[in-house]
């Protein structure tokens, strides 16, 4: 099977969606499938709409000589009107891989309707859908008024560190050691990830009770990063909150090992690969009730779910976990147990592979 994957920019981009794409491509190739990466230059949403009226995208897809095209749904503005021509002129099935629906992200009310209209039109232009979570699938169903094309569900996995084996006694020692609560944030520093909510919560606690490490890109929303840096300085937390920038591989694994819990109070998560990663290291996670975090975090068992923007609820939980290390230990054990129930990448990617074969016949 010759498969095309249409994306924006570089495959090595640091985000959960691109990690998913890399894992999928690697698995398909390991199974003998041919995969061609077709990349469009990243630009503004509105400039991408102009791609529909250019021959360039159509030519790139035709030149790839593929049997089926998988589009990362992020490229939807570039192909919302073009997909009909792709199916007709190149005569191949077009399937979308949906990591995050733009129309369910937070937008001003005057533009939200337009995003929904464009995205609905896009979803109607494909012959199949791959969804990354039950939440995403539910939202797709809502957009399409229950008129779903053939689809499959393939959730992201957390086994990104297959060599890691965390033992209960290591978790116990980590949780019960006295000292500041070691809090890890793994996520690019953008407003949707909610780092400001965490910092506002920390302002309500004694500074000596916590230490925070933030691992994520600092170049995606420069104005927001400046706001975060100002908030840290005005709160006199420079020695308590460390913005490390992007961290990958073994360096990231070491951060997971060194911390007590992960906090990511996002305004919305379509799944949350880092939640599952954290559980592999026995880290409880505090997420929010918005989006798909509830598919991973069992409130009060292996972590907690708070309302978005609720700094007071977050502060209360952090103080409780700092003071009650036995509770922290129980949550950590439960998090490790939960990780064992998650699918691995091979299982999720095989679901997609079988689905693509079905779309060809």
Image (spheres, helix red, strand yellow):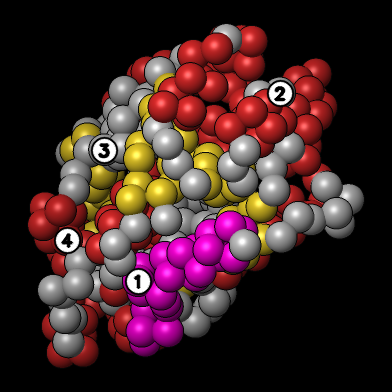
| First of labels 1, 2 by sequence position | 2
Find the distance from the CA under tag 3 to the CA under tag 1.
Answer: 20 Å
Q: Residues within 10 Å of mark 4 (few under 14, many from 20)?
A: some
Q: Is residue 171 above or below residue 70?
A: below
Q: What element does badge 3 sit on?
A: loop
Query: Is 343 one of the magenta-colored residues?
Result: yes
Return the residue at label 3. Answer: 12
Q: Please tell me whether mark 2 or mark 4 is closer to you in this view.
A: 2
Return the residue at label 1. Answer: 346
Q: What element does badge 4 sit on?
A: helix
Asked which quadrant contains residue 349, the reply is bottom left
Residue depicted at x 73% and y 51%: 140
Asked if residue 220 lies left or right of residue 77, the reply is left
Return the residue at label 4. Answer: 253
The stretch of residues the image draws in magenta is 337-360
Q: Please tell me whether mark 1 or mark 4 is closer to you in this view.
A: 1
Find the distance from the CA under tag 2 to the CA under tag 4.
Answer: 42 Å
Q: What element does badge 2 sit on?
A: loop
Residue depicted at x 26% and y 38%: 12
Q: What element does badge 1 sit on?
A: helix
Asked which quadrant contains residue 133, the reply is bottom right
Q: Residues within 10 Å of mark 1 (few under 14, many from 20)?
A: some
Percent from the top left, x then y, of residue 308?
61, 48
Percent from the top left, x then y, of residue 30?
25, 63
The image quadrant where one finds the C terminus is bottom right
In contact (CB < 8 Å): disc 1 and disc 4: no
Residue depicted at x 61% and y 46%: 93
From the viewer's side, name the closer residue of 124 and 200.
124
């Amino acid at each position: 099977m010759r498969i095309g994957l249409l994306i924006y920019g570089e495959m090595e981009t640091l985000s959960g969606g691109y990690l998913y794409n890399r894992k999928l491509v690697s698995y398909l190739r390991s199974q003998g499938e041919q995969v061609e990466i077709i990349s469009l230059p990243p630009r503004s949403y509105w400039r991408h709409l102009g791609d529909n009226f250019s021959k360039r995208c159509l030519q790139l897809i035709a030149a790839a000589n593929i049997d089926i095209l998988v589009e990362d749904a992020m490229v939807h503005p570039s192909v919302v009107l073009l997909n009909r021509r792709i199916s007709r002129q190149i005569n191949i099935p077009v399937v979308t891989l949906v990591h995050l629906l733009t129309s369910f992200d937070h937008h001003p009310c005057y533009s939200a309707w337009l995003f929904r209209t464009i995205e609905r039109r896009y979803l109607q232009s494909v012959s199949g859908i791959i969804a990354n979570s039950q939440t995403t699938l539910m939202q797709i169903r809502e957009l399409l008024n229950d008129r779903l094309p053939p689809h499959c569900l393939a959730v992201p996995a957390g086994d990104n560190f297959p060599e890691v084996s965390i033992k209960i006694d290591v978790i116990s020692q980590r949780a019960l050691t006295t000292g500041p609560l070691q809090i890890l944030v793994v996520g690019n520093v953008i407003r949707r990830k909610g780092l400001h909510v965490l910092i506002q919560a920390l302002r309500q606690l004694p500074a000596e009770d916590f230490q925070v490490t933030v691992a994520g890109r600092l170049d995606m929303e420069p104005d927001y990063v400046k706001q975060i840096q100002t908030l840290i300085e005005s709160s006199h937390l420079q020695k308590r909150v460390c913005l490390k920038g992007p961290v990958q591989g073994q360096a990231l694994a070491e951060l997971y090992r060194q911390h007590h819990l992960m906090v990511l109070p996002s305004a919305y998560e379509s799944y949350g690969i880092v939640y599952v990663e954290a559980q592999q290291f026995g880290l409880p996670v505090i997420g929010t009730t918005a989006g798909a975090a509830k598919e991973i975090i069992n409130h009060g068992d292996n972590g907690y779910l708070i309302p978005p923007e609720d700094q007071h609820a977050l502060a209360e939980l952090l103080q409780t976990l700092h003071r009650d290390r036995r509770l922290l230990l129980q949550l950590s054990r439960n998090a490790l147990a939960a990780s064992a129930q998650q699918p691995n990448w091979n299982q999720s990617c095989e679901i997609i592979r079988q689905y693509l074969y079905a779309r060809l016949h």
